[in-house]
Amino acid sequence: MNSPERLPTEAHKPFAGYLWGALAVLTCPCHLPILAAVLAGTTAGAFIGEHWGIAALALTGLFVLSVARLLRAFRGRS
């Protein structure tokens, strides 16, 4: 069978692009209240509750990075 090492790099791009897209959806800053509600009662939820600004800034940075990588992964495909 074709092992991942033998597949051309073009075969990895859609999979990686979909992973970056899923990360972009999860880290969208507009989802911060939902994320805080889901993580309520955990250490991460306590951090988000105490530090909304830092959490929003970190999620925004991760969101921008993941969208940029998503676009880069699908730019060459047509």
Image (cartoon, rainbow, N blue to C red):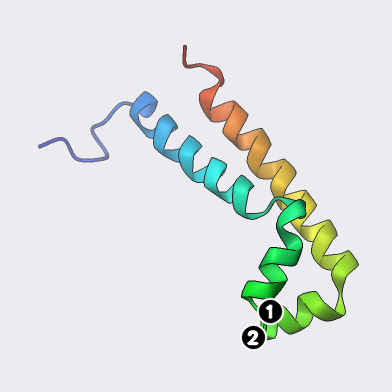
Vertical arrangement, residue 57 with respect to residue 75, above or below: below
Numbered tag placed on residue 18 in the rendering: none
Q: How many other residues sit within 10 Å of disc 2, few (<14), some (14-19) or many (≥20)?
A: few
Vertical arrangement, residue 6 with respect to residue 39, above or below: above
Rendered image quadrant of residue 58: bottom right
Taking depth in this image into account, of 63 and 25 the one nearest to the observer is: 25
Q: Position of residue 38 (x, y in %)?
A: 62, 73
Residue at the spot 71% in from the left edge and 47% down from the top edge: 63
Q: How many other residues sit within 10 Å of disc 1, few (<14), some (14-19) or many (≥20)?
A: some
Q: Position of residue 30 (x, y in %)?
A: 76, 52
- Asked if the residue at tag 1 contacts the one at tag 2, i.e. Cβ–Cβ closer than 8 Å, the answer is yes
Vertical arrangement, residue 35 with respect to residue 26, above or below: below
Q: Position of residue 11 (x, y in %)?
A: 34, 28
Question: How many numbered badges does the structure rendering display?
Answer: 2
- Quadrant where the image shows the N terminus: top left
Mark 1 element type:
helix
Q: Is residue 8 left or right of residue 15?
A: left
Residue at the spot 81% in from the left edge and 78% down from the top edge: 49
Residue at the spot 58% in from the left edge and 50% down from the top edge: 23
Q: Is residue 42 left or right of residue 15?
A: right
Q: Mark 2 and mark 1: span between their CA atoms?
A: 5 Å
Q: Which residue is mark 2?
A: 42
Q: Position of residue 51 (x, y in %)?
A: 86, 75
Taking depth in this image into account, of 5 and 53 the one nearest to the observer is: 53
Q: Which residue is mark 1?
A: 44
Vertical arrangement, residue 46 with respect to residue 71, above or below: below
Mark 2 element type:
loop
Rendered image quadrant of residue 46: bottom right
Amino acid type for the residue under numbered disc 2: Thr
Amino acid type for the residue under numbered disc 1: Ala
Q: Is residue 16 left or right of residue 46?
A: left
